[in-house]
């Protein structure tokens, strides 16, 4: 399984942007970059995914480095409800999702 | 988005009994579902991959006779924890895979918290 590296924790203030980094230096050409988040006592929630180009949706933006060895999940205006563990996962084709430790995001009021 | 439900949301049982957890895809058909387990303050650990109409594929170290998986239809997979023991107490989460274009995305259920006394 392709590996990703994320900081254990990050803090942000409410209504400020948050940039969550993820390193994946061993990514292969067919691996998609997926982001999920998990709120306490809930199942993971799909956030966004991409392959090469930057992606935007209603929840977040995904910025992918040109060499694809890193990516950044961007929350444009953090709210208290964004406090969660964020997982960056590589997935090739129909492979299963393997979760790492993720980044625990704390949002301060 | 795709919705996945689980039932029950929480269950308490006595040691030695069996518990069945249901996972349903509500607005789509899922040929593949997954079962994960999560212990407190730990990440999700994949237990098995469930394919409709065929036997589940278990991850290394997961006892297939203890964690029985049935995927009888395109919208339902069940996980039965047989002869449950206190060490089986955990948060069990299922997910279902949806094909959107060339990439498949997984959507997760809300989880089932199992406590074995």
Image (cartoon, rainbow, N blue to C red):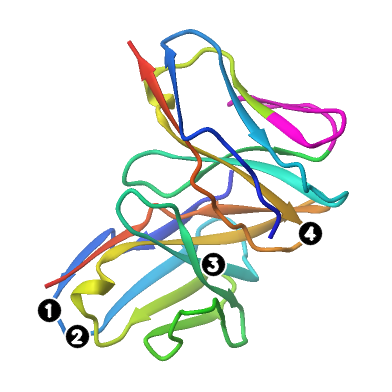
Mark 4 and mark 1 in contact? Answer it, CB < 8 Å: no
Residue A107: image location, x then y, percent = 39, 19
Mark carried by residue B14: 1
The answer for how far apart the CA atoms under marks 4 and 1 are is 41 Å
Query: For numbered disc 2, what is the local secondary structure?
Result: loop
Circles 2 and 4 on the same chain: no
Residue at coordinates 67% horizontally, 27% vertically from top-left? A72
Circles 1 and 3 on the same chain: yes
**Chain under disc 2:** B
**Chain under disc 4:** A
Task: Name the residue carrying label 2.
Answer: B17
Query: For numbered disc 3, what is the local secondary structure?
Result: strand
Query: For numbered disc 1, what is the local secondary structure?
Result: loop
Find the magenta span and give its range: A52-71
The answer for how far apart the CA atoms under marks 2 and 1 are is 6 Å
Q: Is residue B7 above or below residue B48?
A: above
Residue closer to the observer: B74 or A81: A81
**Chain under disc 1:** B
How many residues crowd mark 3 within 10 Å: few (<14), some (14–19), many (20+)? many
Task: Name the residue carrying label 3.
Answer: B34
Q: Earlier in the sequence, mark 1 or mark 3?
A: 1
Q: Is residue B108 above or below residue B58?
A: above
The answer for how far apart the CA atoms under marks 3 and 2 are is 23 Å
How many residues crowd mark 1 within 10 Å: few (<14), some (14–19), many (20+)? some
């Amino acid at each position: 399984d392709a590996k990703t590296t994320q900081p254990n924790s990050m803090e942000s203030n409410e209504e400020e942007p948050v940039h969550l980094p993820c390193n994946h230096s061993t990514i292969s050409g067919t691996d998609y970059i997926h982001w999920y988040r998990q709120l306490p006592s809930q199942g993971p929630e799909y956030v966004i995914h991409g392959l090469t180009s930057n992606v935007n949706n209603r929840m977040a933006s995904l910025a992918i480095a040109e060499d694809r060895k890193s990516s950044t999940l961007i929350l444009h205006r953090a709210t208290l409800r964004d406090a969660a563990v964020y997982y960056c996962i590589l997935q090739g084709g129909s492979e299963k999702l393997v979760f790492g430790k993720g980044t625990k995001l704390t949002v301060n009021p | 988005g795709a919705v996945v439900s689980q039932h029950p949301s929480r269950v308490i049982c006595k040691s030695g009994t069996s518990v069945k957890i249901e996972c349903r895809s509500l607005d789509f058909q899922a040929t593949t579902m997954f079962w994960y387990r999560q212990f407190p303050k730990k990440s999700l650990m994949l237990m098995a991959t469930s394919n409709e109409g065929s036997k589940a594929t278990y991850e290394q170290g997961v006892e297939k006779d203890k964690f029985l998986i049935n995927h009888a239809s395109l919208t339902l997979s069940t996980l039965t924890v047989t002869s449950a023991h206190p060490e089986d107490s955990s948060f069990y989460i299922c997910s279902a895979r949806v094909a959107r274009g060339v990439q498949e995305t997984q959507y997760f259920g809300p989880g089932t918290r199992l406590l074995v006394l």
